[in-house]
Amino acid sequence: MSTGHTSLHDGDSLETVELLQENEEELIQSLIRKDTILLRKLNKELERQLAEIEEGIKIFSEPKVLKKNDT
């Protein structure tokens, strides 16, 4: 054993490992929630853009397309 160090009891080590594992799981869950929220926002934006594109395709696929003149 190194000078200035004390050996932890097995129970203390196990307790610390369990606490660290709980903290790790909480952080992972936080990241998953954050990713999920970000992904939902991104998905919503992509769906909006896709709807605009689909509408444009529908309009410009018509046999006759009229453009409003600048006044």
Image (tube, grey):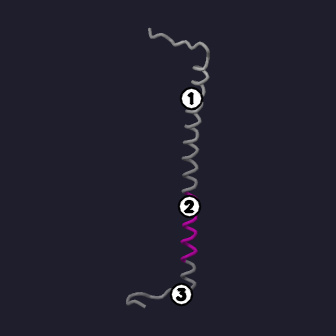
What secondary structure do most residues of the magenta stretch adopt? helix
Magenta residues, as a range? 16-30
Q: Give me the C-alpha separation between circle 3 and circle 1.
A: 65 Å
Looking at the rendered structure, the number of numbered marks drawn on it comes to 3
Mark 3 vs mark 2: give the one in front. Answer: 2
Q: Which mark is residue 28?
A: 2
The local secondary structure at tag 2 comes to helix
Q: Quadrant of the C terminus?
A: top left
Q: Give how far across and how far down residue 49 sits, in percent.
A: 55, 33
The local secondary structure at tag 3 comes to loop
Q: Residue at x 61, y 17 (%)?
A: 62
Q: Residue at x 57, y 24 (%)?
A: 56
Residue 64 placement: quadrant: top right
Q: Is residue 65 above or below residue 13?
A: above
Q: Which mark is residue 9?
A: 3
Nearest to the observer: residue 9 or residue 57: 57
Q: Is residue 59 above or below residue 37?
A: above
Q: Give how far across and how far down residue 68 sits, in percent.
A: 51, 12
Mark 3 vs mark 1: give the one in front. Answer: 1
Identified by mark 1, the residue type is: Ile
